[in-house]
Amino acid sequence: MGNNLEINPIDKKEAICTLLQSLNCSYEIHTSGSDKEYAYLQEQDICITVLHSNRDYPLYIDLENEGEFTLSYYKWHAHYFNVEWDYNQLCQDLADILNNRKCVVVISSSERWLRSALSETKLDKNYNVQNDIKELSKEAQTEIKELKGTVELFYWDIKENLIINL
C-alpha cells in the first residue's frame, strides 16, 4: 500500500543527491532564475544536472514542486509520477544509466528522428533492432525501408556508444 503514497518531488532532492554522490557523479542544482537554460522551471522547481566528463551530454533530473519527476538524457526523456513506486523506478533508471547498464536507443530515418527509448538491459552490436522497428508506426517503418537510417545506442560512458546502420 505504501508504494502509492504521493510524494512531493522537491522533497526527494537530498535523497537523489546522496544517490549521485554514492555513484561518484558531479552535479549542479539549478532553479528557474539560475541560468537561461533553466528558464522553463517554475518558481519552486529544481533541476539536478549531472555533469558528464564530456560536457556536451549532461543528464537532467527535473523535480516539479507538487508535480512530477522528469529524467532526461541525450535525445530521450521520461516522466515519473509523484508516487513512491515511480520515484523508485526513476532512481533505478538513473543508476542503470550512470552505471552503463542501460542506454538511450534512438531510431532515425535518414531524414528525421523517429523514436527514443531507454533500453531494458545493456545492448551491444548483437542487439536485434528489428524488434524496436516493429513497434514503430507503419509510416515510420516504410520510411526506414525506403530512406534507410540508423539506430544509436547512447551510453553514459560514450566509449560504449554504437551506431547501427539500417
Image (cartoon, helix red, strand yellow):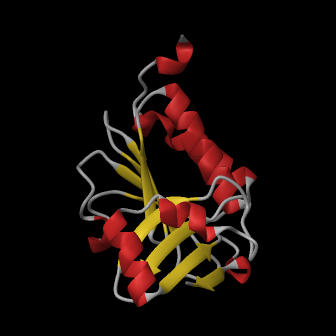
**Residue 60 visible:** no
Give the residue at the far top of this rendering. 1
How many numbered dots are placed on residues in this image?
0
**Side of 82 where 92 appears, left or right:** right
* Location of residue 134 with respect to 58 vertically, above or below: above
The foreground one among 164 and 155 is 164
**Side of 42 where 149 appears, left or right:** right
The foreground one among 2 and 138 is 138
Q: Quadrant of residue 77?
A: bottom left
Q: Quadrant of residue 24?
A: bottom right
Measured as percent of width and height from the top left, residue 56 is found at: 51, 82
The foreground one among 160 and 84 is 160
Measured as percent of width and height from the top left, residue 50 is found at: 56, 64
Residue at image location 31% in from the left, 72% down from the top: 37
Residue at image location 34% in from the left, 88% down from the top: 111
* Location of residue 13 with respect to 137 vertically, above or below: above
Measured as percent of width and height from the top left, residue 124 is found at: 74, 72
- Which quadrant does the N terminus fall into? top right
Measured as percent of width and height from the top left, residue 83 is found at: 45, 27
Residue at image location 66% in from the left, 81% down from the top: 162
The foreground one among 130 and 90 is 130
**Residue 3 visible:** yes
Q: Quadrant of residue 143?
A: bottom left
- Which quadrant does the C terminus fall into? bottom right
Residue at image location 55% in from the left, 77% down from the top: 151
